[in-house]
């Protein structure tokens, strides 16, 4: 199990929940928590934020990577698997409607390149 702290939110999840059975363990690959930076070349953002009828999630990858992008609620429960698989180096944009979400605060978690990046998103009415 992994515990990941986001401000006052603590997410606890199994790596098998994130990567599924049979995938190599990210813990063995030296995964770490990060805010993402220009120096690493890995970044995550969404616009518009806050959103009401959908948001575009942008991912910047410095190299081809196995990527998992999920949405969590403020209780740390997984809400949606947005993307999973290998993505090529460069910029990627993924539309996320969030139509089934009630208004509130949510967290995007991106797992790529041995790093976990989090971003807060807000759904409004």
Image (tube, grey):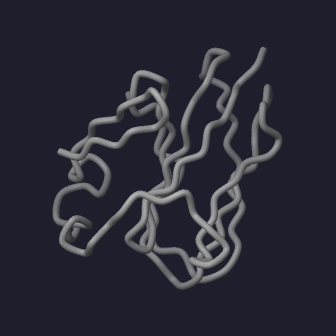
**Nearest the eye: 62 or 78:** 62
Q: Residue at x 47, y 34 (%)?
A: 72
Looking at the figure, which quarter contains the N terminus?
A: top left
Q: Residue at x 26, y 40 (%)?
A: 13
Q: Give coordinates of residue 69: x percent, y percent.
A: 50, 53
Reply above or below: 118 against 11: below
Reply above or below: 21 against 104: below
Q: Give coordinates of residue 24: x percent, y percent.
A: 20, 71
Q: Residue at x 54, y 85 (%)?
A: 63
Task: Please give left or right for residue 37 compared with residue 9 in the image.
Answer: right
Instruction: Specify the farthest residue to the right.
Output: 48
**Nearest the eye: 35 or 121:** 35
Q: How many marks?
A: 0
Looking at the figure, which quarter contains the C terminus?
A: top right
**Nearest the eye: 98 or 35:** 35
Reply above or below: 118 against 52: below
**Nearest the eye: 36 or 125:** 36
Reply above or below: 19 against 103: below
Q: Give coordinates of residue 77: x percent, y percent.
A: 38, 28
Task: Please give left or right for residue 18 compared with residue 8 in the image.
Answer: left
Q: Residue at x 55, y 44 (%)?
A: 108
Q: Give coordinates of residue 36: x percent, y percent.
A: 57, 63
Task: Please give left or right for residue 56 compared with residue 65 in the image.
Answer: right
Which image quadrant is residue 94 in?
Answer: bottom right
């Amino acid at each position: 199990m992994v515990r990941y702290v986001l401000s006052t939110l603590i997410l606890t999840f199994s790596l098998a929940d994130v990567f599924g059975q049979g995938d190599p363990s990210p813990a063995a690959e030296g995964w770490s928590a990060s805010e993402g930076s220009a120096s690493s070349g890995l970044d995550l953002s969404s616009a518009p934020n806050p959103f009401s009828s959908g948001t575009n999630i942008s991912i910047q990858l410095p190299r081809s990577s196995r990527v998992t992008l999920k949405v969590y609620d403020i209780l740390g429960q997984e809400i949606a698997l947005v993307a999973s698989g290998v993505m090529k180096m460069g910029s990627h944009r993924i539309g996320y409607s969030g139509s089934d979400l009630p208004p509130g605060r949510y967290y995007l978690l991106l797992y790529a390149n041995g790093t976990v990046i989090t971003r807060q998103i807000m759904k409004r009415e």
